[in-house]
Amino acid sequence: MATMSQGKYPARNVDDTSLEIGVTSSPVRAASAKSGNSVAGEILITLAKVNRVVLRENDRVTMLDAVCKILIEHRDYIYAWVGLIGQISEKVTLAAASGPTCPFMNSFSLSPDDSSRRGPECAIEAIRKGIPFLIDGTEDEEPCPECPTRREYPHRTTLAIPLIRDRKSYGVFVVHATGPGIFDQQEQALLTDLGDNISYALEKLEADEQRKNHLEEVMLLNEITRVTLESTAITEALPHLAVQLQGALNADRCDLALWSDQRQEITSVASTGSGTTTDPVACPLSEGVAAVLVANRPVPCGPGCVPIRAPVPSGPFIMGMPLVAHGDPLGAAFVTFEDERPCMQCDLNRARMIAGHIALAITHTKTVEANTKRIQALLALHETSVDLAGHHDIKGLLRAIVVRAGKLVGTDMGGLYLTVPNGLQMVVARGVLEPFVDRVLPQGEGASGQAVLSRKAILIDDYATWEGRSPMYADLRVGAVIAAPLLWKDKVLGAFHVEHPSANVFGPDDIEIVSLFAEQAAVAIANARLIYNTETARKELELGYTATLEGWVRALDLRDQETEGHTQRVTDLTVELARRLNVAEDQLEPIRRGALLHDIGKIGIPDAILRKPGPLTEDEWKIMRRHPQMAWDMLSPIEYLRTALAIPYGHHERWNGSGYPLGTKGRQIPLAARIFAVVDVYDALRSDRPYRRGWPEERVIDYIKDHNGTSFDPEIAEAFLAMVSES
């Protein structure tokens, strides 16, 4: 029957004196001391050969293969094998063997719940209890149904020795003999010592690998950093990062995919290795992908998780790694291993570390790409604003707008429509759309027709599959489309649109850019028409200048996304409240301009302070509080805007004198600034910020009531609260 050894077996000489066998012992000398025992000498010589391999070989697989081979060649063993424990699951994988093999012995589970992959009982018991386990071949019933030598040798003897070093279990070392009595106590002790030596060697190799891995990781991080710093576009960086990840994990394939919150889909954007494709492929969120995205560590997953069109090699192991930076899911990396291998903890740690740095690299590259795009947008808007001031060729100006916007969003397809009685007429076109100049798009048809009807910019991810597509463009290869209406006052002047031959390439920033240039185009068209209307030229040009200011303010919002939409909302509310307070009509326009430009001074505040997600330091606050003075310095030389200075300069003054920059109080504060102060606080508290959620309406109202008479003019605060309650 099966018996369990009680700890480590002592090795004995023929005279019953102790024989120490270990890493530093000399088995050959011990054999000469026992020259009368040929079997013991044979065992010791065999183990000496094994120990030389164990101590000298620096490759794990080569060492273990040699150990098993020597034992089979020089002893009466029929099968010897070593299984190593994986460190992400209770699974033992066959690392080396000599003798007959059996397919199911490639790996087995230590988990009692996994009956489908049950392994040899001797190995399982030795690993679980941490001591050698002997099956002596005399049992009436089969003690180990999963033994690979069971059928050929039903009365075999098996000795399983756990591989343990400093309480860490590496796996199991198992030898099989033909029948009972092969493993006496002395042979058990010697084989147990051999197991200790193998454990020592595995520990040493692991330490060597860790040192090597650390050096490789440092070099890898340097390479990731280099790629990140040299790349100005995410599409440029990702293929290099995929190659680095595949090489670092010695994988057969690597796929990087980015997650889109807007579209709720994950897109494969970079692949390297066997069977890969270079075409981006978007896939909807699946259960497998979702499990990877929400995990905080690398997790095993199936081939169906990898979002690519080409089939994934059906290897035994695919690891999915979430790419997360600052708590935001950016996507996932999938690495495929075509051959089964034990996954060590160092592999997991390396995978987690690399995934984290790739996520940071993606974030950095996206930030650089976005900032570059915003700078280019500001420069292009500035060029257009300069052109607006002196350009008399309206078609040339509109074409410049189409070209500039197209470059910023990465396409050479675009055009501009003007409204006509029966629809929209193409007046400017670029790329494959040029043959459509002067063609009329029926009212409400296509993306531009829908943008005109809704008076909002719209994004079509895939025009070819969109139900509202126009037959006019049926023969064109059109993928993604952005269309924005040209709005002037309450009128729709036309529509501006850009197209891309590929689907799913535009995002929110592209919509914003197209909308800004649509505003510029609207201003250009309106100004051109005003030239022919001398009777209303002054007023309309003034409105055009104001619209240009609005465009600049919107452009500034690109720099500080925290205040997106804030400027227009507070402007509208301020004018409405001023009317309610019976402010003269001729004073409303200066108030409106002042509200639009209330934070224009922040253009002089460094990005590191303006966009800081956390609280500002005292020194940073000192710089931030200078923006009203900066606004004064910028606007006061402009005669047209001097009447609008009250709000940009005084909107941070407080009724009780605790504000800045002058600390004026009460009615010494200009009326426009007192009106705006209430509106500004109301909108700021209700809006979401990166460091907090917007307050509910009731809480904001309570705040204004609590600060009535301290921060705010009591009469104005009461009038504002009444206006809000009525609306």
Image: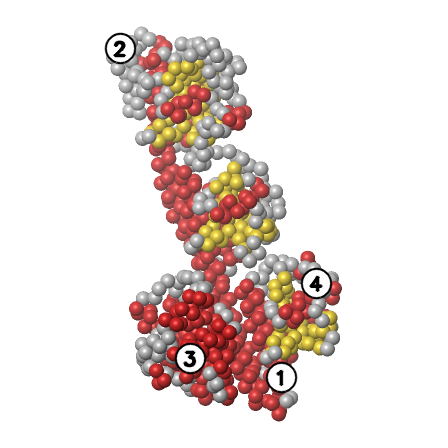
- Residue at mark 4: 469
Q: Earlier in the sequence, mark 4 or mark 2?
A: 2
Residue appearing at x 42%, y 26% in the figure: 64
Q: Earlier in the sequence, mark 3 or mark 4?
A: 4
- Residue at mark 3: 716
Image location (x, y in percent) of residue 378: 50, 72
Relative to 605, does residue 301 appear above or below in the rendering?
A: above
Q: CA distance from mark 4 to mark 2?
A: 95 Å
Q: Nearer the viewer's eye, disc 2 or disc 3? A: 3
Q: Amino acid at mark 1?
A: Ala
Q: CA distance from mark 4 to mark 1?
A: 31 Å
Q: Nearer the viewer's eye, disc 1 or disc 2? A: 1
Q: CA distance from mark 3 to mark 4?
A: 51 Å
- Residue at mark 2: 16
In the displayed orientation, state which residue is furthest to the bottom.
Answer: 535
Q: Nearer the viewer's eye, disc 4 or disc 1? A: 4
Left or right relative to 544: residue 17: left
- How many C-alpha atoms fall within 10 Å of the one at disc 3: few (<14), some, or many (≥20)? many
- How many C-alpha atoms fall within 10 Å of the one at disc 2: few (<14), some, or many (≥20)? few
- Residue at mark 1: 528
